[in-house]
Amino acid sequence: MSWLTFAGVTRGLARSRTAVSARGIVASCVCSTRSFHWRTQHWRYASSSSSLEAPGDSLDWNEAVYRPDDADPFALFQRYRGGDGKVVMQKVVNDLKAAGIRMSDPRVNYFLSAFQEAKHNSDGVMDFDDMKAHIGGNLTVLAKALTKKMIIPDFAEFREDVRAIFEETKQNTSGELFAAIPQLAKVNPDHWSAAICTVDGQRATFGDDSVPFCVQSAGKCLNYPLVLDDKDSAFVHSYISQEPSGQAFNTMRLNNDGKPHNPMVNAGAIVLCSLMKPELETAAKFDWLQKEYMKLTAGEFVGFDNSTFQSEKQTADRNFALGYFLKENNAFLESEKFDLATTMEFYFQTCSMQLNCPSGSVAAATLANGGVCPLTGQKVLSSGSVRNSLSLMLSCGMNENSGLFAFEVGLPAKSGVSGCILLVVPNVMGICLFSPRLDTHGNSIRGVEFAKSLVSKFSFHHYDSLLQSQGERYDPRRQRLSTKEHFITSLLFSASEGDLPAVRRFVSRGTDAAAVAYDGRSALHLAACGGHLPVVRYLVEECGLDMCAQDRWGRTPMDEARYFHHQDVTDYMMKKRAEQQVSSDS
């Protein structure tokens, strides 16, 4: 027996054979003389009989999710029991993978142990009580994944949509390798990989996901918040400013105050390296940074490419010149321990740190999650430092193309000349992209195209919430089948509350103003019932709703206005009805 709370849309009933619609249950109402009340009930759906029972107390109407019986939090695993009553563990694994949970996820370690034991001892099945004893420590994440309560409910569908974008982008073979660092000019130009990690730890990878790459400038969006947390924002920004430069990432120019424009360009990153743990020797500083990267990536792949480090150091005339330019302008922290050559060497080391797309996506997801690593739950960065980093990624992260990228994609991102891009959808997911062919701005051509395609498919752009119509885009944070029903329910609720701006917004987004609940009651019925004349006027005059449309009990909106003594609404409807009759007679 599963428990479902109905609001707007209820997924379980979509597959039910009952004659009562989920939308109707939510839309049922109780009208009093003074007000309209939205009725929300906690319903139990009995799959064996396709019937509905109402056990009583109301719950939060915004929820439309599976709820295991509170008395038995393991009730959701009943569906995985076979004919002998034992749990078929492979079925659980399959559903977890569909939800984007990997078996390497540290949050399902107890379950993985139980699964391995079941495979080894009993052909993949486990006694129900034994399973409960094994996985109690993983119950929270298992329940969220198996009941589709994670940030992307239909992750399998979302993954396939992203895969289509990835494959389409793969066809683009334009661009050149970065020749200024000889070692980067030797990589395979056809490498193409992408990885996603949501704030709930849902994972997806595509292409050459095991191929490591140097982070180069992409690491700046990670180094910057680490230094902010070690020092403080006021101190750091007394040496580095926060505005876009509008110039190439390696330009030899400071702002009017004699400071690097931001920490996302080379000048700012070099100064940042001088501020990072200045009390430590270079070796200890590097060890510290590597350990912090391990925390950001939940212990996944973090490496170091010594050949690229040596190659960059030997050919970095411009960066060395930039370092001396900064020193000449007193841009560094005044300290007896400061040494320019040591600072430059450490800067090259930070550029030569390695990630692969899976580990990079976890680091990006840590940024998306406000500094908390989604796989370990460890707070690696403060939320304030993450906010600052995301702000500068949005305005400065894509070199001199940052403004256009922010306009077209609307998401924080940081690129590196290795072909890496860290892309963040705040509060949703982190994405890591790698393709070494670059455009003239030093950004991965495939990576930029992928990001553009992503926001054209999904409503991830920072300002998509302001759009009156999403067009072909959809929000994967909602179940796709529920979006239409959700908007209808929201329209009906807004009409019942007299919220004219909300009614206008939902209609402009494409919601059918004439949509009705299971009882045949439209937004006009509900607005008339509540005496909301401005909403009634809008629905009649601008949406053309019929004032004489009958609900299942044969009552019209005009009947509702009369019954509840809303004289102004009644007078308006009678006048409009008379005008319509005159118009039809003529």
Image (tube, rainbow, N blue to C red):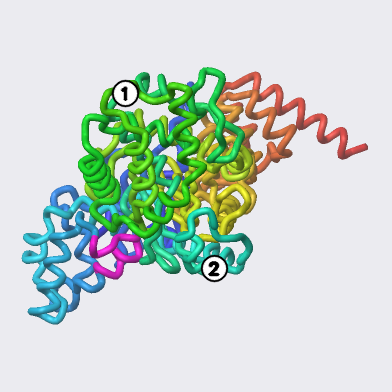
C-alpha gap between disc 2 and disc 1: 43 Å
Q: Which residue is mark 1?
A: 232
Query: Quick one: 64 or 154, which is closer to the camera?
Result: 154
Provide the secondary structure element on which disc 1 rests: loop
Query: Quick one: 556 or 276, which is closer to the camera?
Result: 276
Q: In the image, residue 565 lies at what x, y percent? A: 57, 22
Q: Residues within 10 Å of mark 1 (few under 14, many from 20)?
A: few
Q: Is 418 placed left or right of 139 in the picture?
A: right
- Tell me if residue 22 can be seen: no
Q: Quadrant of residue 244?
A: top right
546 shown above or below 432: above
Q: Which residues are magenta?
A: 92-104
| Residue at the spot 38% in from the left edge and 40% down from the top edge | 344
Query: Quick one: 487 or 254, which is closer to the camera?
Result: 254
| Residue at the spot 17% in from the left edge and 65% down from the top edge | 112
Provide the secondary structure element on which disc 2 rests: helix
Which one is earlier in the sequence, the residue at label 2 or at label 1? 2
Q: Quadrant of the C terminus?
A: top right
Q: Quadrant of residue 377?
A: top left
Task: Based on the picture, tell me whether residue 23 belongs to the magenta stretch.
Answer: no
Q: Which residue is mark 2?
A: 167
| Residue at the spot 23% in from the left edge and 73% down from the top edge | 90
